[in-house]
Image: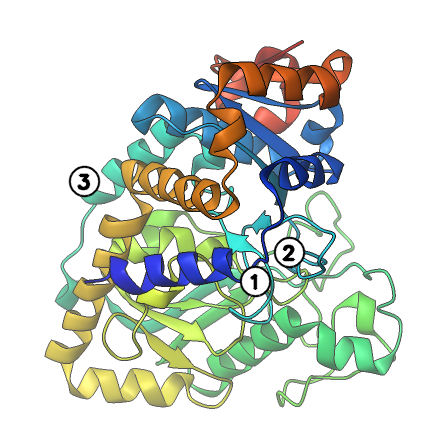
């Protein structure tokens, strides 16, 4: 039942694209800066595709999906922006696969899994999940606080130099500062703090995570949180095992643009109650999320109230946590991710009818000879050694001309 709304949204988002002829769709994909070719079980991209920090993880994931379930021939445009696909709603542009939609499902394009499941390394992701299962704490034995650790975005983004930017666009900082304020108001209900390495090796440093962050000093004070200006909201850096020792886990918008956060990838498997900050951004499996069934939506003034209410009904809280685990088991296991990718490409191919070219050896060969920049392409090969753990910095170990 969980998969039905997810697949329905995948099909709706793909079919919202007004398809041109198969040839024109393939040509438009190649005009996009981030195209990916999957052909006969092999993956090809332009050399400069790998220079984007999130693109290697996507390719790593695609290669692992090929090995796990096999992928159909496809040529698609891919974008890893935290703000989601853009421009794909215009008639002359291709359908773009993104890793999130910042403003909701009606944003153009279709969704692929984000690149932070083991950095695309499905074996690493599976091992991490196995370790979490071994280090298990029964729900009733866990801390009854809403737990969070994360950073504040201290760097000014392009154009973030006025009050409007710091109050409306910096939504990740806004949510995090309000969570830190809740921890000050109700430390018995909320344990949320900022982690930062700014003071490492600096004996004169006294404030690691000041409010507001440096990018907004002089433009905004406390985001109406009630925290004192300049107050340090720093806390200790902890491992994932600490998260598994709490009944309630906060998921807040990303610090860069207030969109998706990679932290949620790790939360579902804990069987804690995922407390999702109210926000419009969506990822591919979000249609399966049901408030007060497999997670709970919270906002700046409701965190401690929600925790207190759930503590009054422990059976309900534990049931929500167990249902949240289904999100991981149905969508986020390595084979689940690979299956979704395969389904997404199959739906994409069917709508654009590109199989009439890519699945015909003669037509595919003619198209490749005429349109592919073969002298500037690389093939993605099976990552080995250091590349398995850090593909961004070891491109030569897992691509070849």
Judge from the rendering whether residue 136 lies leftward or rightward of residue 354; answer left or right: left
The residue depicted at 51 percent of the width and 42 percent of the height is 115
Q: Earlier in the sequence, mark 3 or mark 1?
A: 1
Q: Quadrant of residue 242?
A: bottom left
Q: Residue furthest left?
A: 315
Q: Earlier in the sequence, mark 1 or mark 2?
A: 2
Residue 174, image x and y in percent?
Answer: 64, 77
Residue located beneath label 1 in the image: 101
Question: Is disc 1 surrounded by few (<14), some (14 to 19) or many (20+) residues within 10 Å?
Answer: many
Q: Is mark 3 on a helix, strand or loop?
A: helix
| Label pair 3/1, CB-CB below 8 angstroms | no
Residue 190 visible? The answer is: yes
* Residue toward you, 83 or 194: 83
C-alpha separation, residue under disc 1 versus residue under disc 2: 7 Å
Residue located beneath label 3 in the image: 134
* Residue toward you, 128 or 359: 359
Residue 289, image x and y in percent?
Answer: 32, 69
Q: Which residue lies furthest to the top in this view?
A: 401
Judge from the rendering whether residue 90 lies leftward or rightward of residue 123; answer left or right: right
Q: Which of marks 3 and 2 is nearer the N terminus?
A: 2
Figure quadrant of the C terminus: top right
> Where 195 falls versus 26 (above or below)?
below
* Residue toward you, 95 or 336: 95
Residue located beneath label 2 in the image: 85
Q: In which quarter of the image is residue 88?
A: bottom right
The residue depicted at 49 percent of the width and 31 percent of the height is 356
Figure quadrant of the N terminus: bottom left
């Amino acid at each position: 039942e969980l998969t039905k709304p997810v697949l329905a949204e995948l099909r709706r988002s793909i079919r919202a694209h007004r398809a041109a002829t198969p040839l024109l769709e393939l040509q438009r994909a190649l005009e996009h800066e981030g195209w990916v070719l999957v052909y006969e079980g092999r993956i090809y991209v332009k050399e400069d595709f790998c220079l984007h920090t999130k693109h290697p993880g996507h390719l790593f994931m695609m290669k692992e999906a090929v090995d796990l379930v096999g992928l159909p021939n496809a040529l698609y445009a891919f974008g890893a922006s935290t703000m989601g696909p853009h421009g794909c709603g215009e008639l002359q542009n291709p359908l773009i696969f993104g890793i999130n939609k910042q403003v909701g499902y009606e944003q153009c394009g279709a969704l692929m899994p984000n690149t932070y499941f083991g950095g695309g390394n499905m074996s690493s992701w599976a091992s991490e999940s196995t370790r979490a299962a071994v280090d298990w704490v029964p729900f009733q034995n866990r801390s009854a606080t809403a737990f969070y650790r994360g950073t504040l975005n201290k760097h000014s983004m392009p154009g973030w130099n006025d009050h409007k930017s710091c109050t409306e666009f910096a939504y990740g900082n806004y949510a995090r500062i309000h969570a830190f304020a809740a921890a000050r108001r109700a430390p018995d209900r909320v344990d949320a703090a900022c982690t930062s390495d700014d003071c490492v090796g600096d004996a004169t440093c006294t404030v690691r995570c000041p409010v507001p962050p440096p990018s907004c000093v002089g433009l905004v004070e406390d985001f109406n949180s009630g925290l004192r200006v300049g107050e340090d909201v720093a806390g200790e850096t902890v491992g994932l095992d600490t998260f598994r020792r709490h009944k309630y886990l906060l998921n807040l918008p990303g610090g860069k643009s207030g969109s998706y956060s990679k932290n949620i990838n790790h939360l579902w498997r804990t069987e804690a109650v995922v407390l999702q900050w109210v926000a419009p951004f969506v990822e591919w499996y979000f249609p399966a999320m049901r408030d007060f069934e497999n997670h709970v939506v919270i906002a700046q003034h409701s965190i401690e109230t929600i925790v207190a209410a759930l503590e009054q009904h422990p059976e309900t809280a534990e049931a929500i946590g167990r249902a949240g685990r289904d999100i991981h088991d149905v969508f986020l296991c390595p084979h689940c991710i690979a299956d979704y990718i395969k389904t997404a490409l199959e739906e994409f191919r069917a709508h654009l009818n590109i199989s009439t070219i890519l699945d015909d050896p003669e037509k595919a060969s003619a198209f490749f000879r005429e349109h592919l920049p073969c002298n500037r392409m690389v093939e993605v090969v099976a990552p080995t050694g250091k590349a398995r753990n850090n593909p961004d910095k070891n491109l030569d170990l897992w691509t070849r001309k």
